[in-house]
Amino acid sequence: MLSIEDIVADHAKWVNWAKTHGLTDCDAEDAVQNVYLWILEKGDVSKYDFKGRVNDFYMWQAIQSKSIDIYRKQKVFINAEPEDRIDTTTLEEYQEWIDHCYECVHEAAEEEHWYLKKFLEYYEENGFNMAKLSRETGISLWSLRNTLKNIKDHAEDKCSAKLQQAR
């Protein structure tokens, strides 16, 4: 009969497995400790028993689950900039820049094939929803995505200098 001590005996192996999920040493230790606590809370060690040894498959799944939990719980820290570096651009200035970008994209689409301009019009009319546009036109979603990417790339090539000046 397998006990928790038998599972803990392979602690280094479990920590190495947790590290393969991209965790740091400290987080890998935490993940493995969480697995131990989870096993103890369930109180059923029998499913981890495979012919008198620890079932590696169940341990791998448990470690993977706890590693994902650690990733989800990690906080994202944003460094606050000093006051002299804070952007004091007003909302009106941002709106002006966005309008300039919008015009630039339309100018680039007009310079290309007629269907790029038509696509852009339909795309805007449908609330920027490519799935809806795909259902209505019968054009594959992948093809629509590529068309939008082509418009964007062309607009960046044509308007990058203008946008830098406007900013």
Image: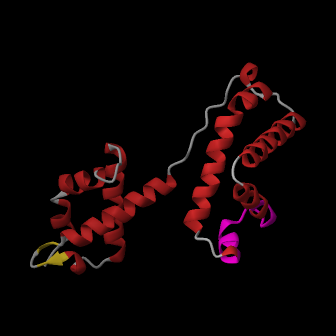
Which corner quadrant holds the C terminus? Answer: top right
Residue lying farthest right? 92
Q: Quick check: 74 above or below 160?
A: below
Q: Position of residue 71 (x, y in %)?
A: 45, 54
Q: Position of residue 106 (x, y in %)?
A: 78, 47
Residue interval drawn in magenta:
123-136
Q: In which quarter of the image is residue 93?
A: top right
Q: Quadrant of residue 54?
A: bottom left
Q: Is 130 inside the magenta-drawn segment?
A: yes
Q: In this view of the protein, which residue sits in the foreground, 23 or 164?
A: 164
Q: Quadrant of residue 123?
A: bottom right
Residue occupying image coordinates x 23% and y 57%: 14
Q: In this view of the protein, which residue sits in the foreground, 130 or 29?
A: 130
Residue lying farthest front? 113
How is the structure coloured here? secondary structure
Q: Is 89 inside the magenta-drawn segment?
A: no
